[in-house]
Amino acid sequence: MLNRQKMLFAALVTAFGLSGAAYAADGADPVVAKVGDQEIHQSDIDLGIANLDPQLAQLPDDQKKLAALSAAIDVKAIAKVAQTDGIENSDEFKKRLAFLRERELHNAYFRKYVVNTVTDDEIKARYDAEIKKIPPQEEIHARHILVKTEDEAKAIIKDLDAGKDFAELAKAKSSDPNKSEGGDLGYFGKGRMVKEFEDAAFALKKGEYTKTPVKTQFGFHVIKIEDTRMAPPPALDQVKDQIRQLVMRDKYIALLNKAKEGTKVEVLDENLKKGYEEVSKEQAQPQQ
């Protein structure tokens, strides 16, 4: 389960749209549309795409561009009317504008000194550190034959005792959907199967099969162990995005703590004070 600090960082990334927009490397920013005398540039579309609703973000690229363009046109049209209406002079608008300005400064600083500074070497180092924390876990490679009655299972065990091939018996007699693969369940660790099945399977050695039927909610099983091994760690490519988030979190916390040095933070609301103090303590602790 994620601790409070990890949850806060995940919320930060989601809420503030820290992915950033993609801008042309050569600085080209063509005009793609006009609303009256107001221009909409490619950078506006890129920024709109980067901040689309998560559901719209799943659309094909051409539809995302269209959604971003449509939103930009709507924004330009309404903003012009709102300006004429004098909304920008209201205290409420000025407060919101100040908040948005500070948030965007935060986000830009985050991108510059966190997102854009993560290197492959840092990711690899953090990956190696996380792998060392994973306790060794035994895995077994098993096959099974599932039948409805205990007598059917006992008959299969007799066939195995007589030297018949387990995989062929599974193909002929098992009622499990994987019968065509000879009852092959592949490798799995503890906690993946129902308790009765798991207890019986992990009690066997390589090459052994159960000498008595194993009853579960699904029926009666005959289980054979093809191999045992210590579970290999996930490859770096499989978890690179998650590891990158950990590196970014560490960089962000360090950056945040430095930014707060010499600055007094005082929470006047007693209902919020305790919670904020707990978060601050967690941020000050070494990262796990």
Image (cartoon, helix red, strand yellow):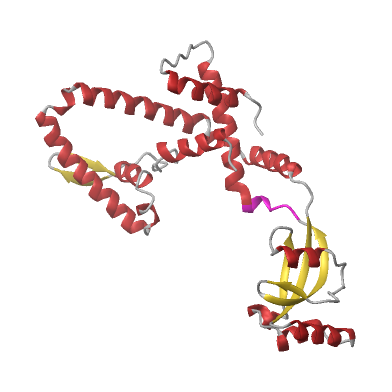
Residue 17 in view in this figure:
no
Give whichever of 183, 209 is nearer the camera. Answer: 209
Q: Residue at x 13, y 39 (%)?
A: 37
Tell me if 43 is positioned left or right of 248 in this view: left
Q: Is residue 136 above or below residue 202?
A: above
Tell me if 258 is positioned left or right of 141 in this view: left
Q: Is residue 197 above or below residue 262?
A: below
In this view, the residue farthest toward the right is 162
Q: How many tags in the picture? A: 0
Q: Is residue 17 above or below residue 184?
A: above
Residue 8 in the image, given as x and y percentages of width and height: 50, 34
Residue 145 in the image, given as x and y percentages of width and height: 74, 79
Q: Residue 218 sits in which quadrant?
A: bottom right
Q: Is residue 51 above or below residue 269?
A: below
**Quarter holding the C terminus?**
top right
**Quarter holding the N terminus?**
top right
**88 drawn magenta:** no
Give whichever of 28, 149 is nearer the camera. Answer: 149
Q: Residue at x 70, y 80 (%)?
A: 181
Residue 144 in the image, given as x and y percentages of width and height: 75, 76
**237 drawn magenta:** yes
Q: Residue 24 sits in which quadrant?
A: top left
Tell me if 130 is positioned left or right of 280 in this view: right
Give whichever of 224, 27 is nearer the camera. Answer: 224
Q: Residue 271 sits in which quadrant?
A: top left
Residue 193 in the image, given as x and y percentages of width and height: 69, 64
Q: Residue at x 58, y 26 (%)?
A: 283
Residue 157 in view in this figure:
yes
Residue stretch rendered in magenta on the structure: 232-238
